[in-house]
Image (cartoon, rainbow, N blue to C red):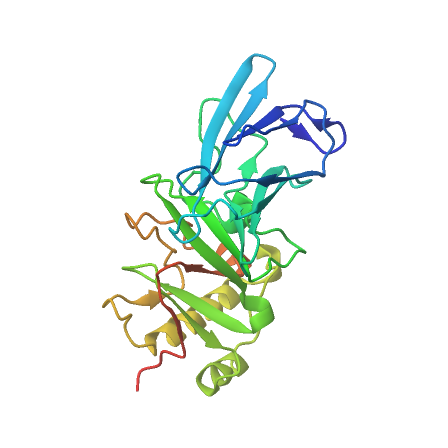
Amino acid sequence: MSDNQNGLKLSVILTVSDGQVLEFPAGTKLTTRKDMTVKPTAKGEVAWALELCDQAGRIWGRPFTLLVDGERLVEDDRVLSAVILHESGFLFLDCIVEGREEDYRFDPTSLEPKPTQGRPNLDAGLSLFERGFARPGTVTPGNIRMITLCGGCSEEFKFRTYHAGLSDIFYYYCDSCPNVVSVSHNEDLVYEKLKRINKVITPPARYDDFSTDEVAENVDLHNEITSLLRPCPCGGSFALFNPPTCPHCGTPYIDFREDIFRRINEYYLMHVQGAESLHSHWVE
């Protein structure tokens, strides 16, 4: 439904609780950005209603509400909102509350929704890149707090992302809770194992670049590393293909499909708010 050369074929309407309306008419060129300052409501929140429309009318809509870590905003708070139609084919709603060190980014909304689905971007199992939270060639700043909806229970939760490649770490999720553990490539236990690998799979990884034996060798590498990790504080275990999960219902947020290339190319560690991010969690 979107075309980088011809512009946006859908119209996008964002209505704000203080009465402001932002509209991107059909034919708007990508990339386009509009900014506005939004005031909190009497409930101490900022609320938006997003609609995607074609010539026949509305085909999808979703409300967005911002409370900062559950805290009410006050009348003097200024929320600077940026609405971005990006060339990647996603709409981004980013917010900055003046005086706070964090920015907030809501679920990027695909500009190519399927009317029969009704809820673009909520398909369980999509990667951060497929959802639009991450983009190749662009490093997501660490101060951005992502706000997303679970595809299982539709409850909202927050998370941050960290670039594992730039940090020289491997990371693994728990199989029983949203906790995640990271280990440095430079730690002795990891470094010694890496030296024995003929060809380490690193992003951007392609199937054609590795033999079946090399793939198996890399899977074994990660299995050896995780076998040396202590259990999660919840009692669960860490493993390469464990998905990050919703903190409310436990629904997998990303499905790695037991595919090491899909897993390694998801090089952003996802730290769910309220979960533990553990480091060097080795068996003693």
Residue 245 appearing in the image: yes
Residue occupying image coordinates x 30% and y 87%: 284
How far from the left and from the top, in percent, is residue 26?
68, 22
Q: Nearer the viewer, residue 79 or 89?
A: 79
Residue occupying image coordinates x 43% and y 38%: 122
Residue occupying image coordinates x 33% and y 75%: 227
Residue 142 found in image quarter: bottom right
Residue occupying image coordinates x 65% and y 29%: 2
Question: Is residue 223 depicted above or below 267 in this figure?
Answer: below
Q: Residue furthest front?
A: 76
Q: Residue furthest right?
A: 5
How far from the left and from the top, in percent, is residue 244?
39, 56
The answer to whether 135 appears left or right of 159 in the picture is right
Residue 171 found in image quarter: bottom left
How far from the left and from the top, in percent, is residue 13?
58, 26
Q: Nearer the viewer, residue 172 or 17?
A: 17
Question: Is residue 52 depicted above or below 103 in this figure?
Answer: above
Instruction: Look at the image and tell me in which quarter the N terminus lies.
Output: top right
The answer to whether 91 appears left or right of 65 in the picture is right
Residue 259 appearing in the image: no
